[in-house]
Image (cartoon, helix red, strand yellow):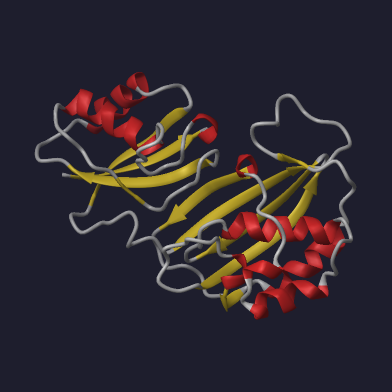
Amino acid sequence: MNIKLTIEYDGTDYCGWQVQPNGRSVQQTIEAALEQILGAKIRLNGSGRTDAGVHALGQVANFIYDGEADLWRLQRGLNGVTPRDIAVRRVERAPDHFDARRDARLRHYRYRIWNDPWPTAVERRYSWHVHEPLDLAAMQRAIGCLEGGHDFASFQAAGCEAAHSVRRVYQSSLRRERELVVFDIEANAFLRHMVRNIVGTLVQIGRDERSAASFAELLAAKDRTLAGPTAPPEGLFLMEVRYEEARQG
C-alpha cells in the first residue's frame, strides 16, 4: 500500500520536519508511531522540509507499507500515540506511483506578524512581534513584482542544497487582520528560508528603512547580502500542498 498522510503540527519544540542527529524532528516522531502501530520500520517521504520552529497545517507525506492496513484505525492510532502538538488530519490510500515530494505542484506558505506595541501571550508561538508601526501600503506595493518565474537567489539561505534558485510564484498577498499582518505566498517550490528572507525585507520596507521600489531591484540583483534579515521561524506556516495542476501565473 502507498499511504498518504496530511499532517498538522506545532513546530515550536521540534528541530524541523526532517530527521536530524541533534534533536527530535516531526518526521522521526511520526515514524516511531507508525512502527509502534504497524510493527514495521517506516520511512516517511515528506512534501518538503520545514525548519526548526516552523509550523504546518497541511504537510503531506507518503510511505509504502508491505501489507494491508485499516486506514481509519491507523489514523486513530497515530493520533493516540503522537504528542498533542502533532495531528494526523487525513490518511488516504494513494496510487502506487504517488510521491509526496516529486508530485507536488503548488505549496502555500503563510507568515504572521504581530504588529502591536505590546507583546501577546497567546500568539507569541505563532507570530513575529514587530512593535513599530508598519506601512502596509508600501509593503503591498513591494510584493507586486513577486508573481511569475524569477531567480530568487537574493532570498536564498546560505547552504541551500537546491539545484537552482529559479521558482515560479503563482500568487502573493499581504493584509492586516487587526493586530496581525498576514503574508501569503503560493509557488511551485521554495528555497531554504526564502519566505522568511522575503518577510524580513518587507518589514524593513514597512519600517521605512528601504523603499518599496528597491524590492524589485533586490530581486533582480540575485545577491543575498543585499536583502533584509531572516524573519524568525515562529511566524511561518506551511498551509497546503496541492497535487493537481497549479494555476498559471
Q: Is 17 placed left or right of 216 in the picture?
A: left
Q: Position of residue 229 (x, y in %)?
A: 70, 56
The single residue placed furthest to the left in the displayed view is: 67
Q: Residue at x 29, y 42 (%)?
A: 92
Q: Count how many numbered circles sit on residues in the image.
A: 0
- Location of residue 204 with respect to 221 vertically, above or below: above
Q: Residue at x 40, y 36 (%)?
A: 22
Q: Position of residue 46 (x, y in %)?
A: 35, 49
Q: Is 73 placed left or right of 176 in the picture?
A: left
Q: Quadrant of residue 23?
A: top left
Q: Is 231 placed left or right of 180 in the picture?
A: left
Q: Quadrant of residue 237?
A: top right
Q: Is 139 placed left or right of 11 in the picture?
A: right
Q: Position of residue 7 (x, y in %)?
A: 41, 38
Q: Residue at x 57, y 53 (%)?
A: 109
The single residue placed furthest to the top in the displayed view is: 80
User: Where's the C terminus, which quadrant?
Assistant: bottom right
User: Where's the N terminus, which quadrant?
Assistant: top left
In the depicted view, which residue is nearer to us: 25 or 174? 25
Q: Position of residue 59 (x, y in %)?
A: 43, 45
